[in-house]
Every structure is written in C-alpha cells, then in structure tokens.
Image: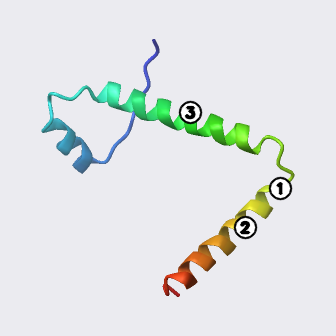
Amino acid sequence: MVSITLSVPKEMKSQMDTHEEMNWSAVAREAIKKRLILLERFREFTKNSELTEEDTIELGRKINKGIAEKHDLL
C-alpha cells in the first residue's frame, strides 16, 4: 500500500482529534473508493455521447435555471 498526504483545515483537524476512535485513513480510503466508482459509472454512461464539454455546461445551466424558476428562486 502507498501513502498519500491529505490537507484539511485546522478546524476540521481539531474536530477529527476529538474522535480518536475513528480510523481516518479508512474513512478517506472509503470516500475515495466511492468517488472512483461514481466516476467510472459516469464515464461508462457518457462514453458514446457526442456532446462537447461546452454543450454539457450549457445544458446544465439551462436545467439549473429551470429548477430555480420552478421553485421561485430567481
């Protein structure tokens, strides 16, 4: 196994120190593993897409605007 260094804000580290029972390395490993699974699913889902990155950004903006309008947030 290899080691990595993780930077966290001082306040977060102080909070982490109050939970000595936690294996923070295991927590970080599990979070990274879940994110990798999500990214692989996303890659599989989009592998045949013809949309460009710009297309997806514009689509996301339209969706966000529509949701905001639906909930009277604009």
Q: Name the residue under label 1.
A: 51
Task: Evaluate if marks 3 and 1 touch, with contact meaning CB atoms under 8 Å apart.
Answer: no
Percent coordinates x, y for residue 49 in the rendering: 82, 48
Disc 3: CA contacts within 10 A as few (<14), some (14-19) or many (>=20) = few
Residue 17 placement: quadrant: top left
Q: Mark 3 points at which residue?
A: 37
Q: What residue type is disc 3 on? A: Ile
Q: Which mark identifies residue 59?
A: 2
Task: Evaluate if marks 2 and 1 touch, with contact meaning CB atoms under 8 Å apart.
Answer: yes
Residue located farthest toward the front when viewing the structure as drawn: 70
C-alpha span from label 2 to label 1 = 10 Å
Q: Earlier in the sequence, mark 2 or mark 3?
A: 3
Residue located farthest toward the top when viewing the structure as drawn: 1
Residue 15 placement: quadrant: top left
Q: Residue at x 42, y 35 (%)?
A: 31
Q: What residue type is disc 1 on? A: Leu
Task: Find numbered disc 1 in the image and state the secondary structure of the residue it sits on.
Answer: loop
Vertical side of 28 occupied by 54: above or below: below
Q: Is residue 61 left or right of residue 32?
A: right
Percent coordinates x, y for residue 61 in the rendering: 66, 71
Vertical side of 20 occupied by 2: above or below: above
Q: Residue at x 25, y 46 (%)?
A: 12
Percent coordinates x, y for residue 19 in the rendering: 15, 35
Q: Residue at x 64, y 34 (%)?
A: 40
